Amino acid sequence: MTAFRIWVIALTCLVIGLTGCAKEYRYIPPTSEAGLQCVTKCLAVKDACRDRVLESARVVQQECERQSAEEYLECKIRAEEEYSQCQDKAKEEYYACLKYASDRSLCEGKKCEEERCYKRT
């Protein structure tokens, strides 16, 4: 047997094997009263489950947004305090330099930068 024939036979076996595994499922609605009640109950349970999940997600999102806003506000307050302290210290150091330095041209004010705060979305 040639390599080509072996390859064709192997490919044919693979295709036959895969088509044997493929099943087609079709939904056939129940016709009996018990079957209809079962489907109705199942849909109601599914809807209730979905509603619980959506409510839970809404609560988690609200908590996340509240926490994010709180952290942002805390960051802004801390950043303003640190910036103000930095400016006060820079002024003190600059004036001390002017007062005690033999060469006042070397005195320069320290640059302060305010921390950036970001809101999480």
Image (spheres, rainbow, N blue to C red):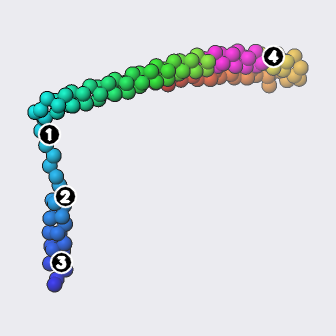
Disc 4 to disc 1, C-alpha distance: 82 Å
Residue range of the region highlighted in magenta in the rendering: 76-90
Disc 1 marks a residue whose amino acid type is: Tyr
Magenta span contains residue 79: yes
Q: Is residue 34 rendered to the left or right of residue 48?
A: left
User: For the residue carrying disc 3, how many other residues have a C-alpha within 10 Å: few (<14), some (14-19), or many (20+)?
Assistant: few
Disc 3 to disc 4, C-alpha distance: 90 Å
- Which residue is rendered at x = 38% and y = 27% of the image? 53
Residue at image mark 3: 6
Residue at image mark 2: 21
For marks 3 and 4 on the same chain, the one whose residue lies earlier in the sequence: 3
What element does badge 4 sit on? helix
Q: Which mark is residue 27?
A: 1
What element does badge 2 sit on? helix
Q: Quadrant of the N terminus?
A: bottom left
Residue at image mark 4: 92
Q: Which mark is residue 19?
A: none
Q: Is residue 34 visible?
A: yes
Disc 3 marks a residue whose amino acid type is: Ile
- Do callouts 3 and 4 mark residues in contact (Cβ within 8 Å)? no
